[in-house]
Amino acid sequence: MNKVLVIGAGGVSSVAVHKMAMNADIFPHISLASRTKSKCDAIAASVKARTGQSVDTYAIDAEDVPALTALIKAIGPKLVVNLALPYQDLTIMDACLAAGAHYMDTANYEPKDVAKFEYHWQWAYQDRFKAAGLTALLGSGFDPGVTSVFAMWLKKHKLRTIRQLDILDCNGGDHGQAFATNFNPEINIREVTAPARHWEGGAFVETPAMGKKVEFDFEGVGPKNMYMMYHEELESLARFLPELERGRFWMTFGDAYIQHLTVLQNVGMTRIDPVMYNGVEIIPLQFLKAVLPEPSSLGATTKGKTNIGDIATGDALDGSGEKTFYIKNICDHEACYEETGNQAVSYTTGVPAMIGAAMVMTGVWSGEGVFNIEQFDPDPFMDMLNKHGLPWTVEELAGPVAF
């Protein structure tokens, strides 16, 4: 029997497990584990009510390799889907190697003590996974994930080369809170406050965090300010698109979010180094996470849409000269909540996690070693996006972006 074990019980996990249960022909047996079993039980109850499918639940510390290895061996999954925190990527990979299970995640590893989003720690596992005859699929979320598949689909069907690539991530949703993040606050704020980096001229160029702002009119959302920042798919795309001359990542933020974040930075609440409080060592950002709204609780109040996509410029595949294409998905928060009980930011990551897992479970994508999502055929993944809630469109633009 094809079994899958999902680790993590946040909003993304909730979406992924719901969508797996909706595809029982691919996922006939689903197990869900996290540090807090009650969160797993709540997801399992929702899945049962919505789909009639059962989900087995377990408590596990994903940083305890021997315990996790024992759990994987006891369940016997073909694939372990890591939807926990990026800090835990390496311990889960270690456990998969020890237990003989394939591995998949949605975000690259980062150490707890410094905001470094780099693939080299996981790429270093190549020989070990190859020797074990196992697959490790990295970055099967939306960004990274779908945005990388979008680029490779354009490279396969529209452009012989991609010289310039801009990834645009817009969340036009309103959750009604004064300040909240739409995914894990700790990870979100670490990303946003880290220096921006973009790929240009064969190297990464670093600029101050939130230092470059551009207004862009997003279909389905309207004009929004987007800020250039670093995101890990730039590293893998620069590797697998060797002709890439410039690659950038942009994300939208409202003025209120920027104002709140600026104040929090100024008073030291976004620090990730320990401070002493009443004789106890705490991490300010982790304390802030504890008092902010839980992202999975925002679904019921969030309205509006997301719009995420790629704008790519290069030489046309048909030999007609330079062309620019814009490929994107638009997703509605309320529709996502109606289907899975989660808002669109969780949905747009959880659905690709299910699809990437399906690619491995069915053997459509296979190989021995560590693979980024860009290394596989984009077509079957793109087909499943259309069928499972994330339809995409592609259009030719008049020319390259002017910003």
Image (spheres, grey):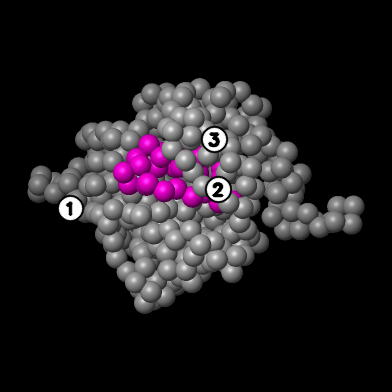
Q: Identify the residue under disc 2.
A: 57
Mark 1 neighbour class, 10 Å CA radius: few under 14, some 14 to 19, many 20 or more: some
- For the residues labelled 1 and 2, the Cα–Cα distance comes to 47 Å
Residue type pointed to by label 3: Ala
Residue occupying image coordinates x 74% and y 49% = 284
Q: Identify the residue under disc 1.
A: 160
Identify the magenta region.
Answer: 9-34
Q: In the figure, 297 relative to 63: above or below?
A: above
Q: Do the residues labelled 1 and 2 touch (CB within 8 Å)?
A: no
For the C terminus, the quadrant is top left
Residue type pointed to by label 2: Thr
Q: Earlier in the sequence, mark 3 or mark 2?
A: 3
Q: Which of marks 1 and 3 is nearer the N terminus?
A: 3
In the image, residue 324 lies at what x, y percent? Answer: 24, 41
Q: Is residue 365 left or right of residue 206?
A: left
Residue type pointed to by label 1: Arg
- For the residues labelled 3 and 2, the Cα–Cα distance comes to 10 Å
Question: Residue 222's image quarter?
Answer: top left
Note whether residue 335 is visible.
yes
Q: Identify the residue under disc 3.
A: 45
Q: Indicate yes or no whether the magenta region holds residue 91.
A: no
Residue occupying image coordinates x 61% and y 56% = 60
Q: Indicate yes or no whether the magenta region holds residue 12.
A: yes
**Nearer to me, 230 or 119:** 119
Q: Earlier in the sequence, mark 1 or mark 2?
A: 2
Question: Residue 180's image quarter?
Answer: top right
